[in-house]
Image: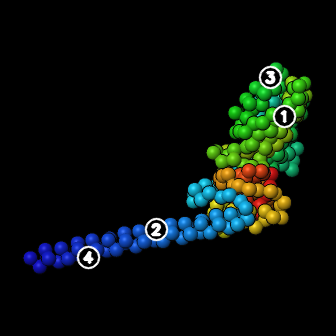
Amino acid sequence: MERYRLKNIIILILALLNTFLLSALAWRGTAAYSAHRVATEQLVSLFESDGIDLDAPIIPSDSPPSALALTRDLKLEQQVASFLLGSPATGSDQGGGIYTYNGQNGAAVFRDTGNFDVAGTLSSGDPQAFCEDFCDRFGYEELTFRLDENQSGTATAVGYFEDWAVFNCTVTFTIDRGAVMVISGSLLSSTAAQTDSGVEFLSAMGALSAFQQMRPESGAAVSAILEITPCYELQSTPTDPVALVPAWHIDTDTVDFYVNCVTGAVRRL
């Protein structure tokens, strides 16, 4: 009998403990939500006082992506070279992180920083279809053409790592009378490892605060914030030739801004 009563007492204590823990978690969650709401309202008011519309619902509460170091992919470079120069393109290690390729359509140079340049007569037929095919194969989106009546001009596209845009990783196609003659840009390997910068990444609200502080210096006339989305910035360091650092893209009614989540630096494009 005593053992039965002791067992019931233990069960009651555990139940009360669980109730306490759930209440504590709920309180913490409510407190965090309230703090976020108050901070959001203050930020919206700050922008409003400066004549800039900022709707609270467009401010993300999600964390930015992880920082990454990319490993060079020579097989991928060979595939790009063969696609552009004609398969198979022959490669040669020039030292210093530089590989060159030659083929029937021209020549290419790839560097360990991810940058590459290709020149020759790289396409025949429809240049737009050629550029679209290249972007689909090798991870570029947002392809934009600037061509005149002679089918001469340029096209540009933005590199993506998985689902994240890398705002300063682009490829540019130079087109002359319907033929793609030069391609220059950055190529992203799909092999990556997370890196630890040792600092807490800026939230979307932190990025907006950094933007608001530097905007007067930029001279940009902004009247509305349209969207805030996470993205990456491509960087090169002595230890990591190709590194992806999380950033926030602030889309305004006039120009685009990007805020580095590690340094807080704001760039205008």
Q: In the image, what residue type sits under mark 3? A: Asp
Report the residue at 54% width, 70% height from top: 35
Dot 4 crowding, Cα within 10 Å, few <14, some 14–19, many 20+: few
Residues at circles 2 and 3 in contact by the CB criterion of under 8 Å: no
Q: Nearer the viewer, mark 2 or mark 3?
A: 2
Residues at circles 1 and 2 in contact by the CB criterion of under 8 Å: no
Relative to the observer, which residue lies in front, 24 or 199? 24
Find disc 4 in the rendering and name its residue. Answer: 13
Disc 3 and disc 1: Cα gap in Å? 15 Å
Q: Earlier in the sequence, mark 1 or mark 4?
A: 4
Q: Quadrant of the N terminus?
A: bottom left
Name the spot of residue 194 as percent of width and height, x first. 64, 57
Disc 4 and disc 3: Cα gap in Å? 76 Å
Q: In the image, what residue type sits under mark 1? A: Arg
Find disc 2 in the rendering and name its residue. Answer: 29
Find disc 1 in the rendering and name its residue. Answer: 146
Q: Nearer the viewer, mark 1 or mark 4?
A: 1
Find disc 3 in the rendering and name its residue. Answer: 126
The vertical placement of 113 against 174, above or below, is: below
Q: How many marks?
A: 4
